[in-house]
Image: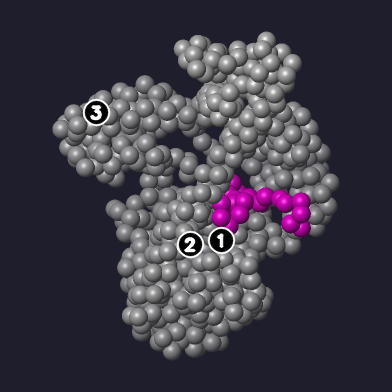
Amino acid sequence: MPAVKLSVIIVNYNVCYFLEQALLSVQKAVAKLGAPAEVFVVDNNSVDGSVAMVRARFPEVILIENKANPGFSKANNQAMRVAQGEYVLLLNPDTVVEEDTFRACCDFMDAHPDGGGLGVTMLDGQGKFLPESKRGLPTPLVAFYKIFGLASLFPKSRTFGRYHLGFLPNDQNHEIEVLSGAFMLMRKAALDQVGLLDEDYFMYGEDIDLSYRLLQGGWKNYYFAGTRIIHYKGESTKRTSVNYVFVFYRAMVIFARKHFAPERAGTFSLLINFAIWLRAGVAVGQRVLAQAAPVLLDAGLIYVGMYFLKSYWEQNHKYVRTDYPPEFMLVAVPVYILVWLASAYFSGAYDQPTKTSRIVRGIFVGTVLISAVSNFFDAYRFSKALIILGGAWSVAALVGRRMISHFLRYRDLRLSERRQKNVAIVGSVAESRRVRQLLETAAVQARLIGYVVPDAALEVTTSQLYHSTTSPDDLLGEVRQLEDIIRIYALDELIFCGKDLSASQIITLMVGLPQHPPVAYKILPEDSEYIIGSSSKDAPGDYYALDIALNLFRPQQVRNKRVLDVLTSLGLLLGAPFFIWFQLHKAGFLRNCLRVLSGSRTWVGLRHMVGPKSSRSAVLSPADAAQTGAPLTEATRRRLELLYAKDYEPGTDLSLLLRCFRQLGREN
C-alpha cells in the first residue's frame, strides 16, 4: 500500500472563482478521508490571478505552472506522472464535492478490486442530474443515435439511449463503459498498466479513450451513486458554440480511427464529419436567430402596419384614388424599416432596461433621415404622410411589443424599471451581513428579502440580532421552512453560505426543493469574495464579485466599438493593395480584416486580462503600444488593459490602430 491514498488533480484555466470553491470543498473532503492525500493544481497559463490565489489560500497544494496552454490531457499527465496515490482523481475546477465523497469513493474501490475507474452522481448548478454521469461507448451506431437526435427523443430506450445509459436508474450503482473527465477516479495500478491520457486529444474525448483502454485492460468502470458533486459545467465549456461542436466531434473521429477497424473508422469519420457541419450550421443558426428574433419581430410588425396604412391612405386620403405601385411595399417599405430599426438600435432601443425615450428618439431620427433622403429619388418618392404615419406606427409597435412581453413576464407595465430579483440568504447573521455587503458593492440588481438560519444556528439570540446591522425583521425562518419561504416571498434566488452549511447540506437542499417556480442557487464559499452559481448545464457559470465598472462593456460603447471595427475593416480591405506592404505579417493582415468584419475578433481589446465571456478575442492589446526598452511584465500588461477598459472611448482604438499599424497582421 502506498503512503498516499488519493491524489487529486485539477487542471485550471482562467476560472479562479470556481477553482477557489472547488479547493475549499476538496480541503474538507480530504480531511474526512482518514488517510493521506495530495492535491495538485496544474494551471494552464491563466491570467486571472488563479496562481496567486492558490499560493495564498492553499499553500499545501502542489502547484504546477505552465507558461502556455498545452491542453487538458497533457496538463493532467504532468501531475499523474508524479502522483503517489493509490487512487488518482481527475477533477474539474468548476465542481463542488461533498465532504464524504473521497472516503466513500475510496471505500467502494477498496471493496471492488476489479474496479479500474469510478464516476459519481453529478448535478448541475440547479441541482438537476447530469446525464453524462454515466455513459456508454460511442460506437458508430450509438454515435449515430446521438448525432441525429434519437438519443434525446428516447433517452430511456435501451436501443437509442445507450450514449447516456438513460435506461439505468440514477440512484443505483452500475457497471458502465465511459467515465466523465469532470470526476474520474482511477486505480493507479490500472493506469500503470494501460497508460495515461492520450495527448492527441486537446480537449474532449480523452476520458472516453482512457475509459475504453481500462476496459480493454480487463478492468471495470463503475458508476457510484453513493455520493454527489456539483458540476457547474459550461464555465470552461461553451456547449452552444461552433468551436465546441468542432472540437467535440473531432475528438470522436480521433477515437474511431484509433479503436475501430479501419473500414469501420472510415465510415464513422464520414458520418462524424457530416454531423460536424450539420451541428455547426444548427449552432450558428440558433445563435443568429436568437439574436435577430426581436429585430425580425419588430420588422414584421412595422411591415404589416405599413400595409394597412397604405391601404387606408389609398382609399381615404390620397388626392388621386389610385393604388401605390408594387415597389412601395417591395422596396421602399423594407428600406424604411431598415433605417428605422438601425436608428432605434443605435439609440439604445434594444438595451435593457427598455426606455420609451430611446425608441422615440431612434424612430424620430430615422423618420427625418427617410424624409430627407427620399427627396433625391424621384422614382421612390411616394408620400411624406405615410413616412410620418409609419414612424408613429413604428414607435407604437416597438413600445407595444415590449409592454406586452413585459406584462406577460412580470404582470406590470413599468417598462423602464429593471425588475429586481427577490433574493434570500441561507446562513448565519455574520455571513448574511457579508453577502449583503458584497451585493451592494457589486451593484447587483436584487431585492434582499431576508435570511434563513441553518438548523445549527438556532441559538442566535435576539440581542445578537439587535447588535448587528441585520434587523430581526430580516429573519425569515429556519431551513426546514425553506419551501414555504420560497413560495410566500416569491423568491427568485437563494444564496447559500458555505461557512455555515456543508456541501452535502447545500446539495441536499438543491435537490429537495421544488423546481417550480424555478429558483436560482448561488454559493458564497468560506472567506471568499465571489458568490457563485449557474442557471443551467449549458449556460456559463456566473458570479457576483467586487468588480470595477468598466466603460468598455457598457452597451453603448459595445455598439460603438463594433461599428468602428466594421468601418475600419472595410476601409483596410479596400486599401489592402496599398496597406499590405506596410504589414509585418501580410497573410495575417487579410485574415484579421475578415475575422474582425465577421465579428469573431476585435481590433483592440483584452489579451492579458480576462473580460466578460461575451467579449471577442483581440488582435492588439493596449499594452502593445507601450514604448519601453524592456519587456512588460504580465501584471503591467493587465494593469494597462484595465485602465483602457475603465476609460474606454472609440478614439482610443483609432489611436492604438495607428500606433501599431504594422502589427495588424499578428496572430494570437
Q: Is residue 204 above or below residue 311?
A: below
Distance in Å between CA atoms under marks 3 and 2: 48 Å
Q: Residues within 10 Å of mark 2 (few under 14, many from 20)?
A: many
Magenta stretch, overall SS: loop
What segment is highlighted magenta in the picture? 514-539
Q: Residues within 10 Å of mark 1 (few under 14, many from 20)?
A: many
Q: Which mark is residue 231?
A: 1
The quadrant in which the N terminus is found is bottom left
Q: In front: mark 3 or mark 1? A: 3
Between residue 543 and residue 58, name the one nearer to us: 543
Dot placed on the residue nearer the N-terminal end, 3 or 1: 1
Q: Residue at x 74, y 34 (%)?
A: 404
Q: Residue at x 47, y 15 (%)?
A: 377
The quadrant in which the C terminus is found is top left
Q: In front: mark 3 or mark 2? A: 3
> What kind of element bears circle 3?
loop
Q: Are marks 2 and 1 in contact (CB under 8 Å)?
A: yes
Q: Is residue 261 above or below residue 282?
A: below
Q: Which mark is residue 92?
A: 2
Residue 560 lies in what quarter of the image?
top left
Whether residue 650 appears in this view of the structure is: yes
Please name the amino acid that badge 3 sits on.
Answer: Gly
Please name the amino acid that badge 2 sits on.
Answer: Asn
Residue under numbered circle 3: 575
Q: Residue at x 52, y 30 (%)?
A: 555
> What kind of element bears circle 1?
strand
Distance in Å between CA atoms under marks 2 and 1: 8 Å
Q: Is residue 158 above or below residue 657?
A: below
